[in-house]
Image: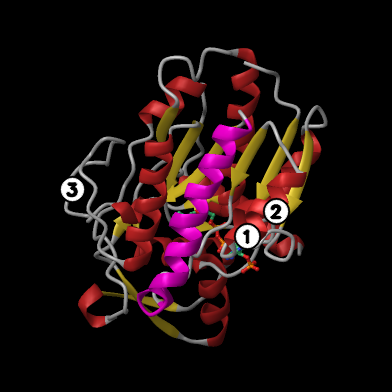
Amino acid sequence: MPEIKSILVTGSNGQLGQSLTSLSLDYPQYQFTFVNRDDLDLSNMNSVSEYFKNNQFDLIINCAAYTAVDKAEQEQELADAINHLAVKQLAKITQDQASILIHISTDYVFDGTNHKPYVENDKINPQSVYGISKLKGELAIQSIAPKAIIIRTSWVYSEYGNNFVKTMLRLGRERESLNVIFDQIGSPTYAKDLADSILQMVVSFTAYSNVFQQESVHLYHYSNEGVCSWYDFAKAIFELSNIACTVSAIESKDYPTPAKRPHYSVLNKAKIKQNFDLTIPYWKDSLQACLKNLQKG
Ligand SMILES: NC(=O)c1ccc[n+]([C@@H]2O[C@H](COP(=O)([O-])OP(=O)(O)OC[C@H]3O[C@@H](n4cnc5c(N)ncnc54)[C@H](OP(=O)(O)O)[C@@H]3O)[C@@H](O)[C@H]2O)c1
């Protein structure tokens, strides 16, 4: 396998994109190009083709996505264009340019009826427009079969953009009490940990050149270690930030949302840990690290 030198990161203004941007400084051996929506609009097939006529990379890390889960119920076509059709196009480009694609997917490809952590080949059954669009993106990669890695992750938060942690910090300071759902169970993912693991994986491709010899598309699960409900997550955010807001546990049925969420979406990470020798931090430790970074501003 040719050595990886040039890396394109799409969605550079997103949580994962910004986390990769920050960590890329520790990897001077790679030449990174970070593109945002203005540089490369994934909803526009012509602009994507034009871009890759003039640009070629050894590796593409696709962090761009339509991530507005509830809004997607109304914007099915746009969600499909970005999460499915653009991913299909990136897979073809990867194939044509003999490069490698790392693509990020979601726990929302599952219906949440499992009682034990989901492994990569568990039955998929997305319950929302967003989940369906992300699954179609996965399937497009599988059918085109470039050298690719698909990483499903869950409950992503970071110092950047909008996410549950930042929303709770704001609401917790504004209000005396909050209702938070306790019947959706999953594992939070600190975007910095995922970004760090992705870069460690890239380093190992070069070291173990046979990664893609047996099968071209590899599917993995990644989140932080441990399990919690959104209620537990909110409690931990307030405890670690010394915020006195009281949290009451409510059921999903008392907080209706346009998109249906899985009740249980814990991902089993054994495969990614074993194949890439990764150590994944416990979710509360990573939460504490993120809160510290947020405090530093
Ligand atoms: N967030 C979660 O809880 C979660 C959970 C499971 C899986 N994931 C997956 O993890 C990946 C990274 O998520 P994230 O949390 O970093 O998402 P994010 O913060 O919402 O970032 C997504 C990025 O995609 C960009 N984007 C949207 N439409 C685009 C278009 N037409 N062309 C180019 N770029 C476009 C956005 O640009 P703008 O900044 O201009 O809007 C944004 O910067 C995604 O694949 C997501 O599906 C996320």
Q: Which of the two residues, 114 or 80, is positioned nearer the viewer here? A: 80
Amino acid at pointer 2? Glu
User: Percent x, y for residue 18?
Assistant: 69, 54
- Name the disc covering residue 46, or none: 1
Residue pictured at 44% horizontal, 55% vertical: 84
Q: Which residues are magenta?
A: 71-97
Q: Is residue 138 above or below residue 26?
A: below
Callout 2: SS = helix
Q: CA distance from mark 2 to mark 3?
A: 43 Å
> Mark 3 and 1 residues: CB-CB less than 8 Å, in contact?
no
> Quadrant for ligand 1?
bottom right
Q: Is residue 245 left or right of residue 122?
A: right
- Name the disc covering residue 227, or none: none
Name the mark nearer the viewer: 3 or 1: 1
Amino acid at pointer 3? Asn
**Between discs 2 and 3, the one toward the N terminus:** 2
Q: CA distance from mark 3 to mark 1?
A: 41 Å
Callout 1: SS = helix
Amino acid at pointer 1? Asn
Q: Mark 3 sits on what residue?
A: 114
Residue pictured at 38% horizontal, 37% vertical: 142
In magenta stretch: residue 87: yes
Q: Quadrant of the N terminus?
A: top right
Q: Mark 2 sits on what residue?
A: 50
Quarter-of-image position of residue 98: top right
